[in-house]
Amino acid sequence: MKTIKFMMTCAVVMLVSIWVSCVDKDPLPDPTVALTELATDATSITVKVDPAHAMECYVAYNVKGAGELDVATIMANGVQVSATEPTEYKIDSLAPQTTYIIYAAVRAENKSAVSSIELTTAEDNSTPAEGEFKVSFDVESASVNVTVVPQDATKPYFYYIMEKTTYEETYMGNAALAAQSDINIIINEYLDFVGGTPADALSEMLLTGESTSYFPVKGNRQYICYVCYASPQDGTVIGDVEIYEFAGPEVAPSANTFTIEVLSTTFRSIEYAIIPSNDDQYSYSLISKEQYEQQSVEEYIANMIYMNGLFMPATSGYYSSLEEYLMADTEYVLIVFGYQAGVCTTEPTIQTIRTNPQGDASQCQFEINIQALNRYQIGYDIVPSDNNVVYYYDVCYGNATADELKSMLDAAIDEQVSMGWLSNRAEYFSIWASFGMVNDATLVSPDEKGFKVYAVAIDSKTGDYGGDFYFSDVCYMPEFTASDITVGCNINQYFDGAQLAEAIPMFYAGWGEEFVFFTPEFTFENGEPVAYYYQVYQYDPAYEDYETYNEDWAIPALLQMGYPYPGMELYMPWGVSGYLMCVAMDAEGNFSKLYRQKIEFDREAATPAEQHPYYSADIQYTPAKKAAAKENNQRTKISTLKR
């Protein structure tokens, strides 16, 4: 019993001892930080940062009025300094006579604190020092041309334009941070577009020597241009970042007023005219009444300008527009407002327009006119009596009947529905039916039975035929004579794709190094053609005698798939024979004799890549230039011509 009492006494003593120990231990003090001004001049501020009881300490700053910074923002974007001893922290590259708020944030375990001090830089009375760059701005109506001349024409550099408010809010006025961030963004965009390494991107992106570039800008906005030398190896800023400010174009309110005239309406379209009172620029938008009622007009215009940016369409003077593929029997709202350089310059003018209900398909009649355009093409007009009815039309042989056409069309629709391509007849006609007047043309093969065009109104809800089939008169293809025009061709240069890919990678890398590229130059004698069509096809040994090719299938193939304009760059694999075909047409619709030339290329005779029109040592890579190059440097691979 004594032993048990003794053990209980010891336990009580230990518990009391532990409790006393816990009570005596002081809790951790809260972290604090103090900021003290040490020096201020026109372009810099120096403060003393004095943290206490902290594990981390960060400093950041912002222009007064650009928004307050919280602990999380300071910790994420600020500069880390010592958390255990005072630090003198200097902020450079500031604007003279500008008020800044300097922040310091500390953290210890799950506790944090922030302090701030408001300081204003002094007036700049010094003589401006000669910068590393000379920058000039030529501001136009909605753009600025920026010219940069570096002192050292051998060092790569980078410059960028941004709105001043964006620069102040996003980068807290830190030009070096802004420059580095934008270099990183453009590098990543380059890599997403073409791949490679950051060094590859920078080697194409950075500039040397004098440069002039176009930037879009908005009216009544302040902009900055920062320019700096940068390393092509790692994309870091080298030296000081120079900042230049300029204003966008001045945009004044416009006295323009607008009259809206509704020219026509159908169940699927609205045609209207906008008549302004002067020649100032304006923009417009047609939206459904439901969309219009979801926000105020001012909010809609602001959002539209924001979404479309500087590429929002603007016009001036009288303007008419036909808006199609609308909903039947639905109200739409047309909004017109003055617009210049990203700024709304007038009060909006608003008019509600309603589309028509759908018409009665059973009552619709058609007027159809057809004529031969040349030996292989017919053109035709279809005019319905009711523009609020959808209808289907096509070309058929002259002796085809309505019952035959119905049977053929029904079979085609049923097959597509059974295969799951379409859900019902109405869906088929929602894709292929038309409305309103149609002016069209199509290729046909000369046939003694002739051709005619038919049209039938459709019930758009069910896809059923809504009335009778209407036919044009039968058109017989007349006897066209051969044109006196003769076609010649010269291929005086051709290029090895492997050499082009190495010499001009921005245009040819990835296009296929095993190809030969060439541009045929055509000549014409005994008259000038109103049009000509050409293509290169893979050589087929079955048709070795080119002079026996059937023109009645070769010429329509050229009309449908050939190229009707000069300067196309074509390509084909090395070691594959091809044949080049071309036909010219005169003003009477007569075709020349088909030009045929077998083509084979020898690598050893290829023209050096340096003689290619796109070769230039001055070409700088940008995604925009690559897109433009693809558009301007169109190519087509050889195909196989079949009967």
Image (tube, helix red, strand yellow):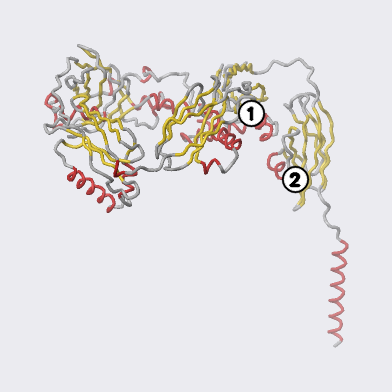
Please, what is the three-letter code of the amino acid marked with disc 2?
Answer: Glu
Residue at label 1? 163
User: Going by the image, does 90 lie left or right of 643?
Assistant: right
**Can you say whether 524 is above or below 327 in the image?**
above
Q: Residue at x 70, y 34 (%)?
A: 172
- Give the alpha-carbon distance from disc 2 to disc 1, as whole Å: 33 Å
In the displayed structure image, the side of residue 568 where residue 371 appears, left or right: left
| Residue 226 at x, y percent in the picture | 64, 25
Query: Observer-nearest residue: 60 or 587?
Result: 587
Secondary element type, mark 2: strand
Q: Which residue is mark 2?
A: 56
Helix, strand or loop for disc 1:
strand
Whichever of labels 2 and 1 marks the residue nearer the N terminus, that label is: 2
Q: Nearer the viewer, residue 576 or 308?
A: 308
- Between residues 434 and 494, which one lies in front from this camera angle? 434
Residue 547 spot, x, y in % from top left: 13, 24
Which amino acid is tagged 1? Answer: Glu
- In the rendered picture of this protein, how many numbered marks are placed on residues? 2
Looking at this view, is 135 or 417 the one in front?
417
Residue sitting at the far front: 363
